[in-house]
Image: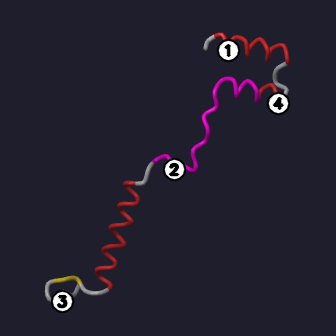
Amino acid sequence: MHYFDGQFGGMHLIWWIIWIIFLAWIFFIPTDIPYQKTKKENPLDLLKNRFAKGEISKEEFEESKKLLNSDN
């Protein structure tokens, strides 16, 4: 490590900056990256998906939909 007039010289300073940025990136990035968030489905969306997949009948769908809407 060479010091020039008490200051870091050239590439040494650049490497320190790179390491500081890298460590800051690791410790301070958000845990949930906004563009990767999945939309949280509400119960009605889940019910619609089950109906679309054929897991439940139309009568079950309508009955469940009425129950969900009565809670609001």
Tag 3–tag 2 contact (CB < 8 Å):
no
Q: Amino acid at mark 3?
A: Phe
Going 62% across and 12% down the picture, which residue do you hit?
Answer: 71
Q: CA distance from mark 1 to mark 2?
A: 33 Å
Which numbered disc flags the more N-terminal residue, 1 or 2? Answer: 2
Compared with residue 28, is residue 39 higher up or lower down, i.e. above or below? above
Which numbered disc flags the more N-terminal residue, 2 or 4? Answer: 2
Which numbered disc flags the more N-terminal residue, 3 or 4? Answer: 3
Question: Where is residue 39 shown, x and y percent of the image?
Answer: 61, 38
Q: Which mark is residue 33?
A: 2
Q: Which mark is residue 4?
A: 3
Question: Where is residue 47 shown, x and y percent of the image?
Answer: 73, 24
Q: Tell me if 33 is positioned left or right of 55 in this view.
A: left
Q: CA distance from mark 3 to mark 4?
A: 71 Å
Q: CA distance from mark 1 to mark 4?
A: 21 Å
Magenta highlight on residue 59: no
Which numbered disc flags the more N-terminal residue, 1 or 4? Answer: 4
Q: Amino acid at mark 4?
A: Lys
Q: Residues within 10 Å of mark 1 (few under 14, many from 20)?
A: few
Q: Which stretch is magenta?
A: 31-49
Compared with residue 9, is residue 59 higher up or lower down, i.e. above or below? above
Residue identifier under label 4: 53
Residue identifier under label 1: 69
Which numbered disc flags the more N-terminal residue, 3 or 2? Answer: 3
Q: Which mark is residue 61?
A: none
